Image (cartoon, helix red, strand yellow):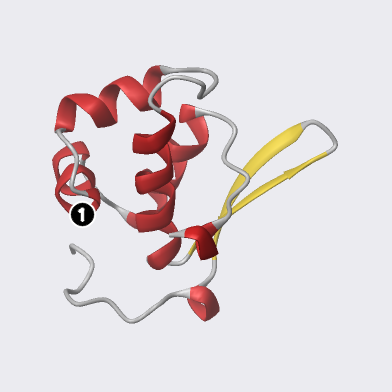
Amino acid sequence: MDHFKSTVTSGRQLKAARTIVGLTIREMADAAGLNHNTITRVERLETLPYHASAADLMAATLQEMGIVFTAGDGRAGVSFSVATMRKRSRPLPV
């Protein structure tokens, strides 16, 4: 997972990214191999010193789906790039 260095700075970024790819909390939990309660906790945190490993798993999963996390000038962002989307073993939910 080291090749997935991201600039995730908050649970808000992760929630926005999850919403962009159209995953429910349960679908995100299944995709990342986490409990759905953990997803909720991570997304509610403003900063991520707690649950950092869960946030990293979520970020890596979302990056595989084409999400790009950005940060600059004190701002955090999220975008979707089909060009960065990796081949998935199962299609995204419709």
Which image quadrant is residue 87 in? Answer: bottom left
Q: Is residue 82 above or below residue 67?
A: below
Q: Position of residue 6 (x, y in %)?
A: 58, 51
Q: Residue at x 51, y 37 (%)?
A: 13
Question: Left or right: where does residue 9 sit relative to residue 85?
Answer: right
The residue that disc 1 covers is 31
Q: Position of residue 62 (x, y in %)?
A: 39, 55
- In the image, 80 versus 7, the foreground residue is 7
In what element is the residue under mark 1?
A: helix
Report how many numbered discs are placed on residues in the image.
1
- In the image, 47 versus 12, the foreground residue is 47
Q: Quarter of the image containing the C terminus? A: bottom left
Q: Position of residue 19 (x, y in %)?
A: 36, 45
* Few, some or many residues within 10 Å of mark 1 (<14, 14–19, 20+): some
**What amino acid is labelled 1 in the image?**
Ala
Name, please, the residue furthest toward the front: 2
Which image quadrant is residue 15 in? Answer: top left
Which image quadrant is residue 14 in? Answer: top left
Q: Residue at x 18, y 24 (%)?
A: 37
Q: Quarter of the image containing the N terminus? A: bottom left
Q: Is residue 76 above or below residue 70?
A: above
Q: Position of residue 30 (x, y in %)?
A: 14, 49
Q: Residue at x 49, y 29 (%)?
A: 12
Q: Residue at x 80, y 31 (%)?
A: 74
